[in-house]
Image (spheres, rainbow, N blue to C red):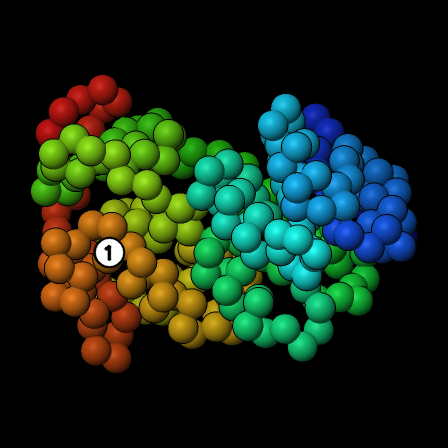
Amino acid sequence: MTDTAPISSLPVSILLVDDEATLREPLAAYLARQGFVVREAESAAAARSVLVSDTPDLVLLDVMMPGEDGLSLCRHLVESKAIPTILLTAKGEPTDRIVGLEIGADDYVVKPFEPRELVARIRSVLRRAQRAPAAPDDDALYEFEGWLLDPLKRRLVDPEGATVPISTAEFRLLTAFLDRPRQVIDRDRLLDLVQGREAHLFDRAVDNQVSRLRRKIEADSRNPHFIQTVRGGGYRFAADVRRLAPGATP
């Protein structure tokens, strides 16, 4: 059976980053046969050089590499590039997989893997990343107690007008809360909203992401005003949220 073509009518570009040529080159050839446009990089440094002039639709990233490791590059990708990323991890490295999900990787695949499974994971991640807007006001700003979140630019601004750096994972988590103000959301549901399939395997991932987000938006992260813990239930965003037209002010 032959895998179907990429989900878009345009070729999907993939950057494959792995220092093992014996894995990278055959995998790149396989992905090319499935209709993907593949660029290869043998290190994080080489990948950064590619990213200066090219923005792929997705990055396949090996965790264990000499020099800068995959987790460091993954953090750069999700915080500054907002590029969907799938980690390629060696069996027996659960900590790396957990950390990767926590910093915003979209999925992971354990080596050795079946190439067709990897293609299925790629398509799943791309569907989530390219999902069409659900309503015409999806470009509207979120406003809560003077804070503004621009969902198109992924830009968070505090009540004084200062931009607060926010990672892809933090953006997804905050958006999940802002779409459901004053609702109790349990951990499994949050992980599904933020990470997608299989993230529920790591209960602590969402708690760590919540802690980091609290440090960005709470006056006192140890006594949170916005993101409240509901004992036995999960979390609740305890503020009213408005949607404003782009360019509007609170």
Location of residue 205 by image quarter: bottom left
Residue name at image x 66 percent, y 53 percent: 67
Residue 247 vs residue 68: left or right? left
Q: Which of the pair 126/216 is nearer the observer? A: 216
Q: Which residue is mark 1?
A: 215
Q: Is residue 209 visible?
A: yes
Q: Is residue 103 left or right of residue 148?
A: right
Estimate how packed mark 1 is, as few (under 14), some (14 to 19) or many (20 or more) residues with alpha carbons within 10 Å: few
Picture quadrant of residue 55: top right
Q: Is residue 34 visible?
A: no
**Direction from residue 26 to residue 79 in the image, left or right:** left
Q: Secondary structure at mark 1?
A: helix
Q: Quarter of the image containing the C terminus?
A: top left
* Side of 86 where 205 appears, left or right: left
Q: Which sits in the foreground, 126 or 168? A: 168
Residue at 42% from the left image edge and 74% from the top image edge: 203
How far across and how far down the image is residue 51, in percent? 62, 32
Q: Position of residue 135 (x, y in %)?
A: 36, 32
The residue lying furthest to the bottom in this view is 232
* Three-letter amino acid code of the residue under disc 1: Arg
- How far across and down, in percent of the image, does residue 43 sit? 71, 47
Q: Which residue is at the far top?
A: 247
- Residue at 53 percent of width and 43 percent of height: 77
Residue 171 % position (x, y):
36, 46
Q: Residue at x 52, y 68 (%)?
A: 98
